[in-house]
Image (cartoon, helix red, strand yellow):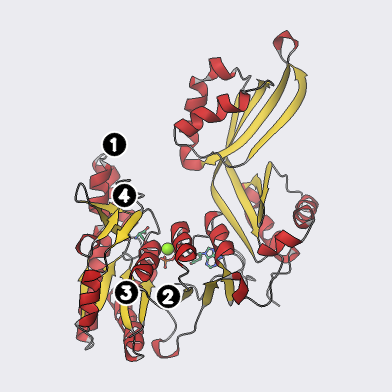
Amino acid sequence: MPRLVMKFGGTSVANVDRIRNVAAHVAREVAAGYEVAVVVSAMSGKTNELVAWVKDADALYAETEYDAVVASGEQVTSGLLAIALNKAGIRARSWQGWQIPIHTSDAHGSARIEGIDPTNLDAGFARGEVAVIAGFQGVHAETGRIATLGRGGSDTSAVAIAAAIGAERCDIYTDVDGVYTTDPRVVPKAKRMERVTFEEMLEMASLGAKVLQVRSVELAMIHRVPTTVRSSFDPPDAARPGTLICDEDQIVEQQTITGIAFSKDEAQITLRSVKDSPGIAAAIFGPLADANINVDMIIQTVSGDTGSGGTATTDMTFTVPAADYQRARAVLDAQREIIRFGQIEGATDVVKVSAIGVGMRSHAGVAAKAFRALAEKGINIRAITTSEIKFSVLIDAAYTELAVRTLHSLYGLDQA
Ligand code: ADP
Ligand code: ASP
Ligand code: MG
């Protein structure tokens, strides 16, 4: 029998009524002849509540216990869905990550899946059971401790399980009916895409589109798991297919730019009057790397003035994740004697807006057009990065919506 993984996010399992609705979606696929594994998130808001409790108990909590607490949200919904399915006459049982087992690394709070043994799930399918699997969690084999996969991690559980059981497809059910050209909550004119390539979806997720966890798209791409994003709020008997994430050759008409993403999780740091000499970049970025701080955009500008002693100086601007901002400043301050910068300046009210499209590979001047359009709206660009299929600009957060909308219409993505 063909196999299918269906994943339901927090809003789709927000209460028992919605869990009954999920059971009806599952019933449809069982009737269609699939062996089904369902992956569930915690009820919406639950994980945030659990995280807050942990921090309240102790700001310097042990990460192993953080995982023990936050993994519980998915245990509740997996049990409730199994109950609802059985009540509807469909044989089902719940599975926690450690019961399958789903093996993970020991990076508690953001663990990676290292392997999934399908034996127990196979046996369940052979018994005619739907497997209802708690998303977001696994177990670290050596210590036997529960580990969670980072926020949004149930998407990754779902795709990894699809790969492990050889599912025909992985359907991610959520509160929107597909992947849009940009977040439809910010740009009402955003269009739903029929299809999007793995590469583009990976960039969109990495650059801030939270509809899928980045790691889930990576896994889908590596294992070639056809993955869809679709709505759990469609009537179960009239559910629409949503957006298919697939290979490039499965897409007929390709636009230059397919999507716009934005991320507010950025902070900018500028070191002024840094001595312009060999080794200076290494002196700045080495200690940041040692502290596990990811530097993204980097701009070095010759400031023109000369420092004390007549040597040329330069300004170094770069971005780090907002969550690491204070730590990054502390690391740099501690290196002040070695780096020898004049001042350190920073900003956290910045946003990175990105345009993504595989068509950029074969078109010149795509980004230049954006710089002009943003300038016409009076939006100042603080930093720029480009790569093969995307470019990003760092701007003041106050202009987020204006910039996203401007680029969205500039590249012809607005709905007619
Ligand atoms: P779930 O709880 O089901 O995992 P998420 O909140 O994680 O749902 O993801 C769905 C949300 O992603 C949508 O409500 C939407 O606001 C947001 N989103 C951001 N960018 C996009 C995009 N390009 N297309 C669709 N949704 C997007
Ligand atoms: N419940 C977890 C979270 O809120 C995992 C998920 O929903 O994917 O991050
Ligand atoms: Mg999610």
- What is the secondary structure assignment of the residue under circle 2? strand
Q: Earlier in the sequence, mark 2 or mark 3?
A: 3
Residues at marks 1 and 2, CA–CA distance in whole angstroms: 38 Å
Asked whether mark 4 lies closer than 8 Å to ligand 2, one says no
Q: In the rendering, at what x and y percent does residue 230 appear?
A: 47, 76
Q: Mark 4 points at which residue?
A: 105
Q: Is mark 3 on a helix, strand or loop?
A: strand
Asked which secondary structure carries label 4, the reply is loop
Q: Is residue 34 above or below residue 317?
A: below
> What residue is pinned by disc 3?
38
Question: Nearer the N terminus, badge 1 or badge 3?
Answer: 3
Disc 1 to disc 2: CB gap under 8 Å: no
Observer-side mark, 4 or 2, equals 4
Q: Which tag is nearer the camera, tag 3 or tag 4? A: 4
Residue 413: numbered disc: none
Residue 346, picture quadrant: top right
| Residue with the mark numbered 1 | 60
